[in-house]
Amino acid sequence: ETEPLTSKKDVSDCNEGEDCKENGLLVRNPKSALRLVEDGNKVHPSQGDKGEAAQISNGYSGVQSNGMGEVEDAQCTAPAATTTTTTTTSTTCGAEGQQQLMELEDRETWSKKIDFLLSVIGYAVDLGNVWRFPYICYQNGGGAFLIPYTIMAIFGGIPLFYMELALGQYHRNGCISIWRKICPIFKGIGFAICIIDLYVASYYNTIMAWAFYYLVSSFTAELPWTSCTNTWNTGNCTNYFSKNNVSWSLHSISPAEEFYTRQVLQVHRSNGLDDLGGISWQLTLCLLLIFTIVYFSIWKGVKTSGKVVWVTATFPYIILFILLVRGATLPGAWRGVLYYLKPDWQKLLATEVWVDAAAQIFFSLGPGFGVLLAYASYNKFHNNCYQDALVTSTVNCLTSFVSGFVIFTVLGYMAEMRNEDVSEVAKDTGPSLLFITYAEAIANMPASTFFAIIFFLMLLTLGLDSTFAGLEGVITGVLDEFPHVWGKRRELFVLGLTIVCFLGSLATLTFGGAYVVKLFEEYATGPAVLTVVFLEAVAVAWFYGITQFCNDVKEMLGFAPGWYWRVCWAAISPIFLLFVTCSFLSNPPELRLFDYNYPYWTTVVGYCIGTSSIICIPIYMVYRLIITPGTLKERILKSITPETATEIPFGDIRMNAV
């Protein structure tokens, strides 16, 4: 029920909210944002006692308003109770105030605290924990690598992880609209994050499609990558696990490698990035099924995805434990463990080791993808996100460490069977470590079919909850930014998003799709995400202000972050990010996959892909300054000043934090 303001003070009093001149309405809503209840009676502020009514007993400053709708709030959002009935009167300024009210009334929350924790753990613990950390660890000094890894986690990764959880929980917005409440000129960061997430979805799910192909192929009495008698095998195929005495030569190729390259990927039918070849219909069907699972897991929001992660986040730990016990009982397992943990202290003097440690902890914890902001925004306001940050980041790091034992006990077994050094067996990196080396070891264990099925199921579940999280970052960001368009059409938007991601993945499903996956993995996300989080840390620490941010945390948790967190957020973490970004840009990776050396022009293409996301940030800055009225100085000041207040819930009371 609405009626125009007829008081002489109806418009003129909104001196700092200019849109009140057009949109000022007196809105009567029995579910008003502010309900002041004391001993069962409503508060009736009048012209004389409005200051008294504005003070709430919990110490927060309420919004001041008189009975005629006079607004004294700088944001022109002044809810107040004016009658003795259960109806309260709320004056809001246009669409923005209505949008904030809708967010408060309609925003869902996690059904249980454990749903949130499992979702964050499932997001942080992904395929990279299984293949990337063990390889990075033994490549950079074994046990000695744990020193720079731990230091980078304490001073870089965990503070950024905690910062994003706190921002999302306090402001209760996705990666785009949250910048209205922090520093509007940096809103382009939100759009950049969404583009990065779409790039990740276009190649990450293809790796899961490979795992799904392996899973389906595992339901046989004899695994297809154990012999050299298949149609895809070549004359160089050598099965050194056979009972016959077989000599391993320089040209020998294992049946597991030929199954991966010639049957699953079919890279032999492509000449490289300039001739990708046709699309593999088998992988297309696998990917279609994966996106179907993803859609029906996230289409209803966190209340459904929060239940799915009970399986996808816990199942990998059960399988890791089984594989760890099995690996430890294999002959030669001790050789792999020794190679994994034997410290090379000289490595600590190399800059590359510290860069790898910083990059590993950063990409493992995963700030900068909008996921932590989105997930935390569905928390209750007083949830202890500080404790959550410590628990989830510790679980993530320990999972990476234990995964190393799972991988290297098997590599030691492989070295024992080949009669080679572990370093020769551990040459494969990235997905090849899982799909060739580990798959081959499993195939030659007793009960190989069982272990193959549970291993590739584990890979699928590891990837699925990370995909849930990445897409939720985009969904929450867009729905919070455009609630009037998509607020009530979440299922339709999620369907459109999954279709776009599927179509965007078609290039990775070609015979040369593995080359595309490698290119996107190295260039589309790495430097772009580092740049995004660096600017995010600078915006929060130096524009929004460390003091203001710490006050926000205190309002949620009841205690303010200590000097350690303040120093990390203000100086150490941005320097940490700048260090990793500059190291990457100064020494771009030389890409090589199998026997294919990437041509020089792929570096240019890679940087163009990476730049296509972060270019949103300067473009929006320019756009913002152009549309803001006033002199240049006034435009800059308005652009770095939060536009809207954050509503602080206190029981049934909601207040504006200005």
Image (tube, rainbow, N blue to C red):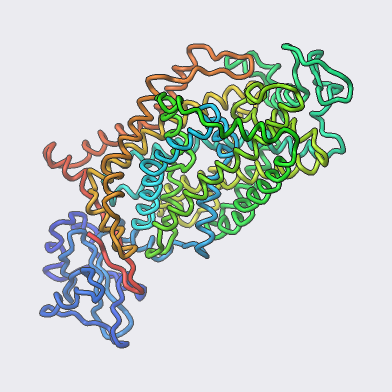
The answer, for residue 169, to whether it is visible in the render is yes
The correct choice, above or below, for 597 with respect to 333 in the image is above
The correct choice, above or below, for 582 with respect to 367 in the image is above
The residue sitting at 56% across, 57% down in the picture is: 306
Residue at the right extreme, as displayed: 244
Residue 95's spot in the image, x, y percent?
A: 31, 57
The correct choice, above or below, for 14 with respect to 632 in the image is below
Residue 616's spot in the image, x, y percent?
A: 35, 33
Q: Nearer the viewer, residue 99 or 111?
A: 111
The correct choice, above or below, for 351 with respect to 50 in the image is above
Q: Quadrant of the N terminus?
A: bottom left
Q: Nearer the viewer, residue 521 or 285?
A: 521
Q: Residue 550 lies in what quarter of the image?
A: bottom left
Q: Nearer the viewer, residue 260 or 136?
A: 136
The residue sitting at 43% across, 60% down in the picture is: 379
- Please state if 359 lies on the left or on the right of 625 as rendered: right
Residue 149's spot in the image, x, y percent?
A: 45, 37
The residue sitting at 73% across, 43% down in the picture is: 326
Q: Residue 213 lies in what quarter of the image?
A: top right
The answer, for residue 282, to whether it is visible in the render is no
Residue 517's spot in the image, x, y percent?
A: 57, 27
Q: Quadrant of the C terminus?
A: bottom left
Tag count: 0
